[in-house]
Image: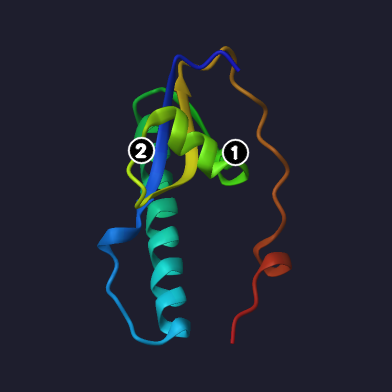
Amino acid sequence: MDAPVAILICLDTSLGDPYSDQRRQYAEFLMGVQSVAMAGSTMLLAAHASGLGGVWMCAPLFAPGSVKSVLDLPQEWEPQGVILLGYPAYEPQPRQRRLVDEVSRFV
């Protein structure tokens, strides 16, 4: 809760390809959302490799209009998440992980 750095991750909706049908246009939007999430994940991995602690929060999804207004963001920017970064106060214990066979299906 005391992270000194917060990075807002946004999707720039003006960058996607235009499609004439709604189904494909929505798929293009979802691909953009996935790309933003992958970029955030890569940032978290890089932070960890540098000895930083980080966490992804999806809070901007609950109030995108307020976030855009307060930060004076362009209309095309859709806030997707916030990455909080800092040096960890402590090293948490690893969580118990489920077996791959419990969470995967190979076909």
Q: Amino acid at mark 2?
A: Leu
Disc nearer the start of the sequence (1/2): 1
Nearest to viewer (mark 1 / mark 2):
2
Local SS, label 2: loop
Quadrant showing the C terminus:
bottom right
In the picture, measured across the screen, residue 52 lies left or right of residue 74, that is: right
Q: Label 2: which residue? A: 73
Q: Is residue 58 left or right of residue 7?
A: right
Residue at x 46%, y 75% (from the top left corner): 26
Rendering coords of residue 29 (x, y %): 42, 67
SS for callout 1: helix
How many C-alpha atoms fall within 10 Å of the one at disc 2: few (<14), some, or many (≥20)?
Answer: some
Residue 34 sits in quarter: bottom left
Q: Residue at x 49, y 29 (%)?
A: 54
Q: Amino acid at mark 1?
A: Ala
Tally the numbered discs.
Answer: 2
**Mark 1 residue crowding within 10 angstroms, few (<14) / some (14–19) / many (20+):** few
Check the image and report above or below for 96 versus 30: above
Instruction: Check the picture and name the quadrant holding the N terminus.
Output: top right
Proximity of marks 1 and 2: CB atoms separated by less than 8 Å:
no
**What separation in Å lies between label 1 and label 2 (alpha carbons)?**
16 Å
**Residue at the image position 43 percent from the left and 46 percent from the top:** 41
Residue 51 horizontal side relative to residue 2, left or right: left
The vertical placement of 84 against 66, above or below, is above
Q: Which mark is residue 107?
A: none
- Residue 88, percent from left and from top: 52, 17
**Label 1: which residue?**
59
The percent coordinates of residue 60 (x first, y second) are: 55, 40
Q: Which residue is at a point 44% across and 38% down the rendered structure image?
A: 68
Q: What is the x, y in percent for residue 97?
A: 69, 49
User: In the displayed structure, would residue 30 be above or below residue 40?
Assistant: below
* Residue in front for this viewpoint, 28 or 37: 28
